[in-house]
Structures are given as structure tokens and as C-alpha cells.
Image (cartoon, rainbow, N blue to C red):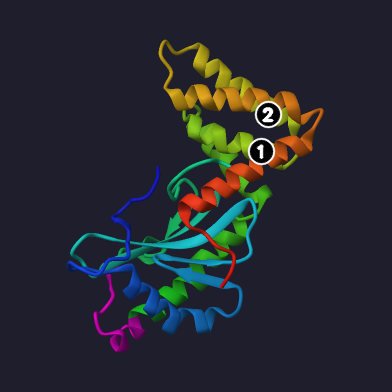
Amino acid sequence: PAFPLWGAPARDCEGGIGLKSIEWHRAVKRYLLPRLGDGWRAHGALLYPVPFEWLWCGLVMSTRPGSQNFQVSGVVQLLAVPFPAFDATCSVNLQHAGGCESWELPEDLDEAGPVMDKVYQRIVDVATPFFAEHGTMAGFTSFMQKEVRNSPANLRFHEKLFYAHLLNDDVPAALNTAETIAAYITGRDDPSPWVLELSDHAARATAAVASDRELVLRAIRENVEHTRTKLRLRDDR
């Protein structure tokens, strides 16, 4: 699923009530970035380490309209998959990992220290190990293989696994995944347009990778740039 899971990534806005991403950003700059050290980028509702290439590991703050309560999820997203939203397939909720406590960001930034201390500790205790386990191509591939076994009819999972196999240079596994996708389409009377497009991309990529892997990588890099643009991800601080 894409976000929102609990609410929605906070948007920058001036009017209305409730937590704004600019308030979260100010709290992050004051209470988190100095403790996280160099190599982290923060903007809007996002906080993430840089640089990154195929995989993005980061924190997404979400909230409900009109509320100062918020949640933070650690997300590992394969940017090679063209997708216009943050994907919660490989994610962990920092609050749920330590019990379902309520986090509320005070409107007065000077009073935000205690709750931001909790967020920081969950980054250290929960998000960082999660990123270490799943934020490599080997770790992410292993995660998606388990997801595919648990939900074999979910083509979104097969799609992620297909691109992961390509980036791992595992052509036989990528071909097998492409065949699974094609077989799914054969068994459906009216597959959706994105499923047909996925099948076409998978077939062309597996046909080309054996003879010209660089061509396939260039196409995947275009996917990455498209996804980064849609998610407004930047490597600079």
C-alpha cells in the first residue's frame, strides 16, 4: 500500500489548523539533525540519510487534518519501481515498535524536546536496524521474496522483486518473475492497464538484459529519476 497508513504525509500550508510539515521540519532541524550528524537530509515531512541510489531509506511523518498528533514510519523504497507515492510495503511504524503511545508536537517549539527525544530514540533503536537489515539490495530482495511467498497474487510485490533481480544481475530469477507476471495476465479476462504495462516492461527488459545490460540499467535509472522527482527526494543537504 502507499501512504497514508494512519493519516497522510503533512503538507506545507499556511492556513488551517493542525500539524504542518514546516512545524515538523523546524523541530527536526532543532532536535534531531544535530544528534544524527552529517549525512542526513530533512525537508517537509521527510528525514533521510544521503546519499542513496537504487534504494531510499527514510522517515515519513504522517498526521491527520486538524491534529497535532503524528506518527513516523521508517520506509525502504526501491526507486527503480516507477511509483508516485511513498510505499509502505517495506516499512516499520516507530511508535508501534515500542507500544501504541500517542505522540503530539506542541505548537511551541521550545516545548517539543521531550517528544522529539522519543522520536530520536526510536530512530536509533528501530529505524536504524531496520534500514541496516532491509536497506541493501540483498536485504531488500530477501524481504520481497518472503512477501511474494506470503502473497503470490500481489503483482506489486512481483514487480519490486523483478527490478531487484535485475539490479542484482540475476537474469534467471528476473526471467522467472517476468514469466510469473505474464502467466497472471494470461489467466485474467481484463487485466488493468498498469498490469499490461508491467508485463511489457518485464518482457522487454529480460529480453535485453542478456545482450545489453547497460541499456537496461539506463532505463532503470530513468525510473529512479522519475520516482525521485515525484517524491521530491534530494541528495543535497
Work out which quarter of the rendered image holds the N terminus and state it.
top left
Q: Quadrant of residue 38?
A: bottom right
Q: x and y percent of residue 230 in the render? A: 47, 50
For the residue pair 150 and 62, the one nearer the viewer reads as 62
Secondary structure at badge 1 equals helix
Expressed as whole percent of the image width and height from the top left, the position of residue 171 reads 75, 31
Task: Let me know if residue 110 is in the magenta part.
Answer: yes
**What residue would you read off at disc 1?**
219
Residue shown at the point (34%, 68%) measured from the top left: 21
Q: Residues within 10 Å of mark 1 (few under 14, many from 20)?
A: few
State yes or no: discs 1 and 2 in contact (Cβ < 8 Å): yes
Query: Is residue 141 in sight in this rendering?
Result: no
Q: Give the distance between the C-alpha atoms of the residues marked 1 and 2, in whole angstroms.
A: 9 Å
Residue 162 pos. (x, y %): 62, 34
Q: Residue at x 49, y 66 (%)?
A: 126
Kind of element beneath mark 2: helix
Residue 38 in the image: above or below residue 1: below
Q: Which residue is rendered at x = 77% and y = 39% of the image?
A: 214
Check disc 2: other Cα within 10 Å, few if <14, some if 14-19, many if 20+. many
On residue 205, which mark appears? Answer: 2
Which mark's residue is nearer the viewer, 1 or 2? 1
Q: Which residues are magenta?
A: 101-114
Q: Is residue 158 magenta?
A: no
On screen, residue 190 versus residue 6, left or right, reads right
Amino acid type at image mark 2: Ala
Indicate the amino acid at tag 1.
Ala
Q: Quadrant of the C terminus?
A: bottom right
Is any part of residue 122 visible from this angle? yes
Which image quadrant is residue 173 in?
top right
**Left or right of residue 113, residue 170 in this image:** right
Residue 174 shows which numbered tag? none
